[in-house]
Amino acid sequence: MSQYNKLVRDNIPEIIKRSGKEFSMLILSEEKYRIALNKKIDEELNEYYDAKDNKEAIEELADILELIQVSAETLGFSLEQLEKIRKVKAEKNGSFKKRVFLIEIED
């Protein structure tokens, strides 16, 4: 039996069940859920870094976006609130689109 010990999408148990395979799972406490979400974000970031092409990269970015949305919800914020905060920060400090790479600031 393969060991996974990781957070998976909600429909995965049903998909496994339909395949006829046996499995074990549990529902995490709020505290353990937040830890698992953070680990899953790390996992998806690594998969994004390792993407072989743009198609794989965009799939991983979609997973990361899903995890960001769910993480915001666990903190009590909606996607709309998250987007509002993102816009305010972009208006105040700019985005990352201009590719500015800061080398140093003189003391």
Image (cartoon, rainbow, N blue to C red):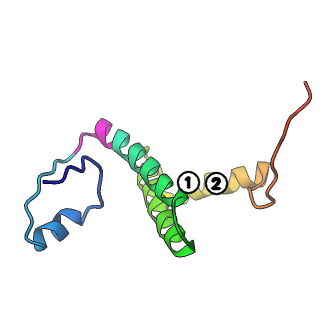
Q: Residue at x 9, y 65 (%)?
A: 21
**Amino acid type for the residue under numbered disc 2:** Arg
Q: Which mark is residue 86?
A: 2
Q: Which residue is drawn at 62% across and 51% down?
A: 85
Q: Residue 82 carries which label?
A: 1
Per the image, is 17 magenta? no
Which of the 4 quarters of the picture holds residue 83? bottom right
The magenta span reads 28-33
Q: Dot 1 surroundings within 10 Å: few (below 14), some, or many (20 or more)?
A: some
User: Residue 76, image x and y in percent?
Assistant: 43, 46
Give the vertical position of 13 relative to 68 (above or below).
Answer: below
User: Horizontally, is 27 left or right of 30 in the view?
Assistant: left
Q: Which residue is drawn at 16% across and 67% down?
A: 16
Q: Which residue is at the front of the view, 57 or 100?
A: 57
* Secondary element at image label 1: helix
Q: Dot 2 surroundings within 10 Å: few (below 14), some, or many (20 or more)?
A: few
Q: Which residue is at the front of the view, 11 or 81?
A: 11
